[in-house]
Amino acid sequence: MSLRCLLAPFKSAQSRRPLNGMSAVALAVALGLATPQAAWSAGAAAKAAPKPPAPMRLPAHVEPQAYTLHLDVDPAQPKFSGEVQIDLKIRPAPVSRLEAATLRLHAKDLAIRAVWLEVGAKRWVGKVLPVDAERVDLRFAQAIPPGPVRLGLAFVGTQQEQDVYGLFRQKDGPGADSGWMSFTQFQAVGARMAFPLLDEPGWKVPWSLSLTVPQRLQAFANTAARSEEDLGNGRKRVSFETTPPLPSYLLAFAVGHFDVRDGGKTDSGVPMRYITPRGRADEARFAAEHGPAIVKRLEDFFGMAHPYAKIDSLAIPVTLEFSAMEHPGLITYGANFLLATPAEQTPSFERYHISTAAHELAHQWFGNLVTPRWWDDLWLNESFASWLGDRVTAEVMPDWGWETATQIARAKGMKADRLVSARRIYQPVLTDEDMGNLWDAITYEKGQSVLAMFEGWMGSDRFQAGVRRYMQRHAWGHASSDDFFAALAVDAPGMPAAVRTFTHQAGIPRLQVSLQCDNGPPRLHLVQSRLLPLGSPGAPAQALWQIPVRVRTPAGESRLLMGTAQAELPLPDSHCPAWVQANADGVGYYRPVYAGQMLNMLAHAPEASAGEVLALLHDAMGLHDAGDLSSAQALALATIHARHPRHEVVEAVIDLLLHLRPLIGAAQKDRYAQAWHTAFGELAHSLGWLPRADDNTFTRQVRRRLLPAMAVQGQDTRLQDQARQAALAWLRDPAAVPASMRAAVLKTAAATASDADAPALHQALMQALLAAPPAPVREDLVRALAAFGQPELVQRSLALLLDRRVDIRESLDLMLKGLAEETASRRAALEFVGARHAELARLMARDEPAALPGYFQSGCSADEARGIEQAFSKRAKAYLGGQVALDRALENVRLCTAWQAHHGAPW
């Protein structure tokens, strides 16, 4: 169904009484609705009058039907004001007289100046009563009758500056002349920081938005501007077309000085544009070249045209905890995921942009056209967009080898899922605290892996047919994961029950595999249980999955949907097979544990695909964690696959060798370095630090990962000297080292600098950072400054986190991740964060300190666990998701301690 047809029922929203150009406060005063005594601040009132937690969900008998929203936004001013009118439908409900006279809404950090309700021809004035930091009650003198009413509110708020959430403002870099710009990020519940509303995803309604902004600025939103009105005094009112039905978290707008690059049209005629901070439109060249091809492949997959009238992609200078957001008509990206100068258009940038754009554009159908009824089903939106986005990336860029993205996602999901504290994919959201734990590797990577596994089981054609069926049934409405399963079940009746065994319980299936060749035809004996790492605080659970086991042997494939604790699977071979691949294509979300010589035989099998080898190497790390694989076996697998022709496999071997590093004591360092040289010495020296004209995907990707590892872990003095000379050359002339290798060169030079040379190099890198270079350069400099190991320099680097000349939103994640790579600097960072926590928190976004414990989860001793607990135990609960992050960090450190004690040194 076309957008034009779907807008017809909502034309009435455009004919409502227009708001004039005055501010919301002035309007309220003019109406006699606002007095100093009547004004109410959501944040202040909640703090002044704490109450027991309110129910998370709003009363179901009050339903929004449409919004008319006007905001007065000047990016140069911290404050904004507005008025919102909400058409409501009041349903009969068994409520008390007091409840019948009350409307509960969401509002956070807003000063509500006036409240009124239009009931027929009458207008009632209401008063505001605090509920908590997220919700308010609007009380009227009499019961509100069932039927249609219109609620109006006038309010004032503050644009966020540290948060990238709600309505916030930023400049494009540290320069004072770049000009303020205002943006929005409402997922999950940021809209309530911009205006009062009923802020739940299950209410999907049309929005009529208008903005009063400075005349010299531009304004963009989900829909095209319908009109602009000059209000005088250097101000204008921009009114936008009414949107098709949207939940509040998908509403978006931006105000500021922008450039617009035309991206042409899709094959279905949808215009594409790229909206950038002024002077940066040329940096959207790569994005504009590939955008239409991504949309074309998505339209082909869904069998329907792009559902919205336009595709604008807008760059936000700095984002936190997200790279992009899928708002219909106005997709927002962190600038480093959308924009690049020719010099900064590295292979990494290209890969990040295409995969991110494919994910966000996939959401235009799966997530926007069909939205979730409640946050329980966020996983389905995100995991599907990740799965389909990776598929489309592989089609758009066939030379990248992106088809192995499924195995890489599987490894990330399993790393999170091995913990006893891991949540399940389908996680009921019952409290505000639950919202702090949804955007993680379980939602994205595990969910994506489970979808890929069942697509492999069903076959791509039947899976695609189920997806199309789901979209057609629920277009422009809501749906749940049960609805999605029901659409798949038409062609695969057993799928819903099988998938739920993976979405409704946490953990990784451990599949013991034994080859039986005596007393009959060849067969496998299979036993399933939950995989738990060494030292896990949980007892072995009696978990049971319906595992879609796909096995490949030289004679072909065998399949079994294994729903019992033990099973036997006949093989197609007439004789005992030379090898058995118990996870065909490497997409199964389970870890096979091979009996006897089966692993060694499989490791040498020439027929293994890149995906199967990747899964094998990732499983080696997980099984080594669980004590099912010895260090000698892990090293043997690394040696066998180090010369694989695919860069993904070589990078997995690098990860496997790094995985063993915490086991290496002082006496083993030389043996460990020799293992690196045995695996990669010849390859590393043939690559060299600087790109060459004949580079292919393999050399480009492996060079940036392998050379720093060889120089540091392999103690390769030749590579160390080359990195140091290249870093000094870059400091003299930034063109001496291309952007693709800048981080690797600078970080390696810092990590391997002698005690005599390190202070001067640190000072030079610090000066380069404070000279305010472009964002990608700043990020690479922070990475390098975090790599020094000398105690005094570690402290100087840490001090940058409190230096107002450096944006902590750019520096904190890179600095703490870098320092966490070495035991000594990790401990210094923990002590610093513990001692300066209050100062850091004041500079960070509101709930960002919740993530701080996670930076130290690579610790591997009881002392480090105690240090983490001491630093955060009294602070974690102050932030959404903080306690869960602390619990997971402590579990990781304690698991590493037990793992280290079990395995000892590998030599």
Image (spheres, helix red, strand yellow):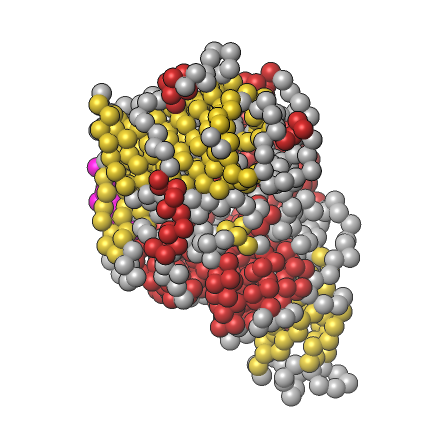
Q: Quadrant of residue 483?
A: bottom right
Q: Is residue 737 above or below residue 121?
A: below
Q: In this view of the protein, which residue sits in the foreground, 464 or 848?
A: 464
The residue at the far front in this view is: 121
Q: In this view of the protein, which residue sits in the foreground, 123 or 69?
A: 123
Q: Picture coordinates of residue 465 (x, y %)?
A: 49, 70
The residue at the far top in this view is: 36
In the image, taking residue 775 as reference, residue 824 lies left or right, namely right
Q: In this view of the protein, which residue sits in the foreground, 95 or 287?
A: 95
Q: Residue at x 57, y 73 (%)?
A: 491
Q: In this view of the protein, which residue sits in the foreground, 354 or 148?
A: 148
The verdict on residue 539 being magenta is: no
Q: Residue at x 39, y 42 (%)?
A: 13
Q: Picture coordinates of residue 261 (x, y %)?
A: 23, 46
Q: Picture coordinates of residue 229 (x, y %)?
A: 24, 31
Q: Residue at x 40, y 33 (%)?
A: 69
Q: Residue at x 63, y 85 (%)?
A: 573
Q: Is residue 296 visible?
A: yes
Q: Quadrant of the N terminus?
A: bottom left
Q: Is residue 731 above or below residue 628?
A: above
Q: Picture coordinates of residue 559 (x, y %)?
A: 63, 75
In the image, taking residue 635 as reference, residue 152 lies left or right, namely left
Q: Which residues are magenta?
A: 279-289
The verdict on residue 280 being magenta is: yes
Q: Main secondary structure of the magenta part?
A: helix
In the image, taking residue 632 as reference, residue 28 lies left or right, namely left
Q: Is residue 852 visible?
A: no
